[in-house]
Image (spheres, rainbow, N blue to C red):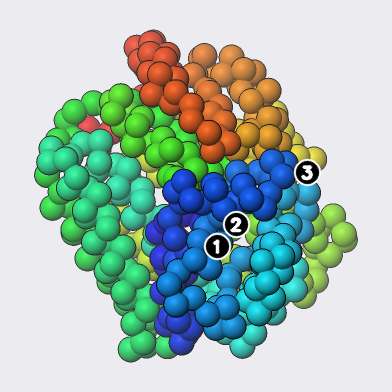
């Protein structure tokens, strides 16, 4: 979960009457605590998640029997599916059997959320849409700001406004609440528009794809995007909603493969997509025109089709397919380079790294580089500097025109 996404989920819980808080930020203590309970085989997101939850147990006045941790789960080969059971195991070892681990899953219809599942799913979706676009605004404005820190301040204030509207109990989860959130996003847009900027300053557009946790957690990826901006780049980070659209597409595909193309289940999937799409339209209406040249694909199918020659989606699954397809989508939009952020040992990064040379060769030599993270120091500035040299060289000879804000 991104910082903004976690804040939105917290506000959604609060709207529904749960006294929720964002788990603490990562720091050295995160790794210290995680290191005591992990073997080294775990991926970085698992260590960061465990470490940050364990930090909560060190809070003054911490009461285990009044605490629950929210750690959704999923099936499949990814280690994410083991996080919640591993967390329970570690808490048990520490004598905290009383702490509840809430681990809803799409496989059980999110029954772990009880009566609030329906409202929480809707609020969660709206929260992801809102915080995804606020982060995207930050990444557009920050490289062009003329007053250092102004874009970060606007982003922080925008999160306050949006999450405040999420939490607000004036309207129950329904049409009026949705429009209240759209109004909050309009206010956030105006806040960003007040950031002093110089959009005539040319930046290199770098697409950032990769493993969802690591690419979104600035702590885990050592704030790569901020460092990239210092080299004159503007980042286009793949968002979280992409993953929701992808899981919908997977449900659709799996039902067809099981001969249930015409079934009540399929009707449910289509209906869900239709409703989610409609809500997205309402929320994003005030931001029309903000993302010139960086428009997201009309459907995730477009991304999957672009990845198809390299990773056919009925055989390959998950983020690796999205990373390859989105890289090509960004190339078509005039990106000057692609960075893939991956936790060390994660198979997504291993697979994509082996495919990128072919993708690059087929796309005018687009610079594509995987950066691995495992929680130990790397000379990121040096590596980014070298990568940006390739990006500038590519920029001089590329044929794909980028439509930039103010030049459309
Ligand atoms: S995708 Fe990779 S890094 Fe992410 S949770 Fe799964 S195994 Fe870990």
For the residue carrying disc 1, how many other residues have a C-alpha within 10 Å: few (<14), some (14-19), or many (20+)? many
In the foreground, 70 or 287: 70
Res 76 visible: yes
Q: Secondary structure at mark 1?
A: helix
Residue occupying the point 37% across, 54% down: 133
Q: Earlier in the sequence, mark 1 or mark 3?
A: 1
Vertical position of residue 262 compared to residue 213: above or below: below
Task: Identify the element where label 2 is drawn.
Answer: helix
Mark 1 lies within 8 Å of ligand 1 (Cβ measured) = no
CB atoms at circles 1 and 2 under 8 Å apart?
yes
Helix, strand or loop at mark 3: loop
Task: Name the side, left or right, on which 354 lies relative to 293.
Answer: right
Residue 183 quadrant = bottom left
* Residue 403 visible in this rendered orientation of the protein: no
Taking depth in this image into account, of 199 and 233 the one nearest to the observer is 233
Q: Is residue 291 above or below residue 311?
A: below
| Circles 1, 3 touching at the beta carbon (< 8 Å) | no
- With 51 as the anchor, is 335 left or right in this view? left
Circle 3 or circle 2, nearest the eye: 2
Disc 2 target residue: 50
The alpha-carbon separation of the residues under discs 3 and 2 comes to 33 Å
Foreground: disc 1 or disc 3: 1
Residue at label 3? 314
Q: Which residue sits at x=43%, y=55%?
A: 25
> Is 272 placed above or below 193 here?
below
Mark 2 residue's CB less than 8 Å from ligand 1 = no
Q: Which residue is mark 1?
A: 53
In whole angstroms, how far apart are the C-alphas of marks 1 and 3?
36 Å
């Amino acid at each position: 979960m991104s910082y903004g996404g976690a804040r939105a989920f917290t506000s959604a819980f609060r709207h529904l009457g749960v006294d929720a808080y964002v788990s603490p930020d990562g720091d050295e203590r995160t790794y210290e605590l995680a290191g005591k309970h992990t073997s080294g085989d775990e991926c970085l997101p698992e260590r960061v998640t465990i470490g940050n939850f364990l930090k909560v147990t060190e809070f003054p006045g911490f009461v285990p029997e009044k605490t629950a941790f929210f750690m959704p789960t999923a099936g499949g080969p990814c280690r994410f599916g083991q996080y919640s059971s591993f967390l329970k195991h570690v808490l048990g070892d520490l004598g905290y059997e009383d702490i509840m681990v809430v681990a809803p899953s799409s496989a059980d219809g999110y029954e772990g959320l009880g009566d609030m599942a329906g409202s929480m799913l809707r609020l969660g979706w709206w929260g992801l849409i809102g915080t995804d676009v606020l982060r995207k605004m930050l990444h557009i404005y920050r490289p062009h700001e003329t007053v250092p820190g102004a874009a970060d301040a606007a982003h922080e204030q925008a999160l306050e406004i949006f999450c405040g509207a999420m939490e607000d109990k004036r309207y129950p989860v329904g049409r009026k609440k949705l429009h209240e959130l759209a109004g909050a996003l309009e206010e956030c847009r105006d806040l960003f528009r007040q950031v002093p900027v110089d959009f005539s300053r040319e930046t290199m557009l770098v697409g950032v794809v990769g493993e969802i946790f690591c690419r979104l957690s600035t702590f885990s990826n050592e704030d790569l995007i901020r460092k990239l901006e210092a080299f004159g780049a503007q980042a286009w980070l793949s968002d979280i909603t992409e993953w929701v659209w992808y899981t919908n597409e997977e449900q659709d595909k799996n039902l067809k493969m099981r001969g249930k193309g015409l079934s009540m289940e399929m009707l449910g999937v289509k209906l869900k997509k239709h409703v989610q799409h409609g809500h997205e339209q309402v929320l994003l209406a005030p931001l029309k025109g903000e993302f010139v040249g960086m428009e997201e694909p009309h459907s995730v199918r477009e991304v999957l089709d672009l990845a198809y020659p390299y990773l056919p989606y009925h055989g390959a699954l998950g983020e690796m397919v999205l990373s390859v397809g989105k890289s090509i989508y960004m190339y078509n939009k005039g990106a000057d380079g692609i960075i893939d952020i991956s936790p060390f040992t994660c198979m997504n990064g291993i697979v994509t790294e082996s495919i990128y040379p072919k993708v690059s060769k087929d796309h005018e030599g687009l610079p594509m580089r995987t950066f691995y993270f495992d929680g130990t120091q790397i000379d990121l500035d040096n590596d980014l500097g070298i990568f940006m040299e390739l990006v500038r060289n590519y920029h001089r000879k590329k044929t794909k025109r980028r439509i930039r804000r103010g030049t459309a």
